[in-house]
Amino acid sequence: MTHIVVDPVTRIEGHLRVEAEVDHGAVTDAWSSSTMFRGIELILKGRDPRDAWLFAQRICGVCTTVHAIASIRSVENAIGARPPPNARLLRNLIQSAQAVQDHVVHFYHLHALDWVDVVSALSADPAKTSSLAESISDWPLSSTKYFTGVKARLKTFIDRGQLGPFANAYWGHPAYRLPPEANLMAVAHYLEALDFQREFIKLHAILGGKNPHLQSFLVGGMATPVDPDKQASLNTGTIAKLRVLINKAHDFVSRVYIPDVLAIAGFYKDWAGIGAGVGNYLVYGDYPDGDEPGAPLFFPSGIIRGRDISKLERVDPLRITESVKHAWYDYRGGDDTALHPSQGETQPHYTGPKPPFERLDTNAKYSWLKSPRYDGQPMEVGPLSRMLVAYVSGHPQVKKHVDGALSALGVGPTALFSTLGRIAARAIETIVLTEKMQSWLDELGANMAGGDLRIHDNSKWDPATWPKEAFGAGFHEAPRGALGHWVHIKDGVIANYQCIVPSTWNAGPRDGAGLRGPYEASLLGTPVHDPEQPLEILRTLHSFDPCMACGVHVVDVKRREIVRVRMQ
Ligand code: NFE
């Protein structure tokens, strides 16, 4: 039995530590620990709820926008504000752009190097790489000359000993299986994806002033003026620019991202049987396709339990609780209570070992993440959950792409319950969104052309119109999964605020009943060829696209004052 510590897990956002027991070449137990503390809930107390989104959005710079949207929805839910159709469409466009950019960056820049051996690409034959690329896609950057250039660029990097983004990996590890030509093709697309994501996210700059942390949200609507004929508004010209960006995204995703995922997956089909995890999938649903309460959601909500895709359960958010049995927090009612987020508490209390330390005491508290549960059960959230729930709901676009991917790989739907399933689901979600974005843009253009320029409902803007006390919940499908914000407003200010973010669902520690969280459960049985180079553990962890910054914030263990900020 070997005890492995992976700390920090790199190529993620934030700080994650994983400890695992390995016996006879496979993981027999695992513990996931987030090593930073988030304090945004405490910062929000006493503030004007209309300002909350500006603070909440700073929870993370990777899934920027998502906490703004969840926050605004929670406040709108509490005070009864209803955004007009144009605001819904602007939000759908901003959210979907966020997901598309985030998923492309995740696949190429955070995850691909677990499957692609960059150093092996140096021995690739550019002519054979060109034939391979042309056999899987009609993407124009595929000539022998092009790949010769990429190879030379890579060689310059490596000869200088400055691996830059390619440093700190397990190059040459026997678990890498791609031939050199596939590795070179993937490296070329890694570099292209850098340019793609920078260009595509201009959509956020157009709709929100900047990226990250867009500035155009507003409780009750949006602050992006729309008028086909005004220079200072979103007008006919900017709609045309957005259309170009969306078309280019669809092009890149359908001709590069999807073919790469299928090509790489073809060499790693055994990973369709590894990394399944808890087998319960939770989706709040998102992208409203109408303006009345209860309007259909483009990605439907639902729960699948025990990998049973013959049944879909309705989500009841009142069944959500959080446990701090193994998290560095106190609850007034003690460690054995589990609280609904509307009654949630954030009382940090670090009781772990003093750094530097070798091992966490995993029988005690061991993470800054709480353990969210639904009906007391751990739930996986994210693109795989969304695509499973949509697939089971009979969503036509999702069904088309899921069936296409399964038949291309020659596997059945149960292959989705795996590390590879998460990767494929993320790619499928990206193509489905790039297809759908056009229609939201069309709808927005048509509204503007028809003279509907409303972007904000200000009937609830004045706190005098609010109840003396109100509770609200805001739900959103962030790139990494189901996100919820809960707000309690009293006398016009925030009395309590709680967030349960996707990475808390997925990366949280064991709960009061000792049940493992999704990361912990998904690592069971993972093969580990060499405990000194736990590449396989990274594969499964990265397939969730971890973001600890969303789950936590910043702590200085010596409690030194780093900066003092005075707010008026
Ligand atoms: Ni910081 Fe996040 C997303 C949220 S966390 S990345 O997506 O919410 O899982």
Image: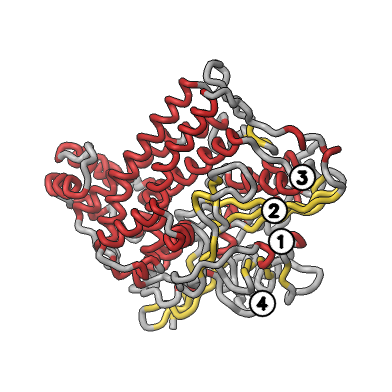
Mark sitting on residue 174: none
Query: Is there any visible trace of residue 502 in the rendered image?
Result: yes
Label 4 or label 2, whichever lies nearer to me, is 2
The residue located at (39%, 68%) in the rendering is 418
Q: Judge left or right: residue 558 versus residue 420.
A: right
Q: Secondary structure at mark 2?
A: strand
- Label pair 1/2, CB-CB below 8 angstroms: yes
The amino acid pointed to by label 4 is Gly
First in sequence: mark 3 vs mark 2: 3
Quadrant (top left/top right/bottom left/bottom right) for the N terminus: bottom left
Name the secondary structure under disc 3: helix
What's the mark number on residue 512? Answer: 4
What residue is pinned by disc 3? 79
- Separation of disc 1 and disc 2 at Cα? 9 Å
Where is mark 1, residue-wise? Answer: 341
Total labels drawn: 4
Image coordinates for residue 424, horizontal then vertical, percent: 36, 58
Q: Amino acid at mark 3?
A: Ile
Q: Secondary structure at mark 4?
A: loop
